[in-house]
Image (cartoon, grey):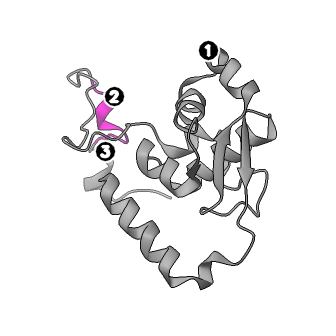
Amino acid sequence: MTLPPEEADEPPPEPRPYLTAGHDGAVAVPDGTGVSGLRPYLLTAGRVEPVDQTLEIEAQVVTTEFGAASYGQLAFEARDIVSLCATTLSIAEVAAKLRLHIGVARVLVADLAALGYLVVRRPSFPLSQDPNLIERVIRGLEAIR
């Protein structure tokens, strides 16, 4: 494919202008959010489904003795989750308190449970059918804000 003569003399557009010499490397980040600048897939190594795909967001999670004893050996988000779950919380509450996407929280909690750092207690009846519980969860999540 040949270009018309008037376009052949022009240099091609810069595909990545941020690589030019005048760029200082700074990246614009929205301010005032307080949310981590990390992409969610970095926290889960690109996984979007937890090892236990039946894990509900209303499932209750609590730290095991092994998890508490291993606290110092865990990496950042895992340490935060294990610390936070010293008291029983739902996966939705973990996500809200740590300002994580709910899918990321599910993956991380499932990983920690599979390794024995957390215990997951599943609801014994279909909670999605209980409007009172749903309202309590919504009020609780709003209170966290």
Q: Residue at x 23, y 44 (%)?
A: 30
Q: Residue at x 56, y 36 (%)?
A: 81
Q: How many marks?
A: 3
x and y percent of residue 28 in the render? 24, 38
Q: Quadrant of residue 139?
A: bottom left
Residue 91 visible (yes or no): yes
> Disc 1 marks which amino acid?
Gly
> Disc 2 marks which amino acid?
Leu
* Stretch of the chain drawn in magenta: 11-20
x and y percent of residue 133 in the render? 51, 74
Badge 3 crowding class, 10 Å Cα cut-off, few under 14, some 14 to 19, many 20 or more, is few
Q: Earlier in the sequence, mark 3 or mark 2?
A: 3
Name the chief secondary structure element in magenta.
loop
Residues at marks 2 and 1, CA–CA distance in whole angstroms: 40 Å
- 23 horizontally vs 54: left or right: left
- 48 horizontally vs 84: left or right: right
For the residues bearing labels 2 and 1, Cβ distance under 8 angstroms: no
Residue position marked by numbered label 1 in the rendering: 72
Q: Residue at x 28, y 44 (%)?
A: 9
Is 25 located above or below residue 8 in the figure? above
Q: Nearer the viewer, residue 83 or 106?
A: 83
- 78 horizontally vs 16: left or right: right
Q: Earlier in the sequence, mark 2 or mark 1?
A: 2
Residue position marked by numbered label 3 in the rendering: 13
- Give the structural element (helix, strand or loop) at label 2: helix
- Give the structural element (helix, strand or loop) at label 3: loop
Q: Could you say which disc has been placed on residue 19 in the image? A: 2
For the residues bearing labels 3 and 2, Cβ distance under 8 angstroms: no
Q: Is 22 covered by the magenta stretch? A: no
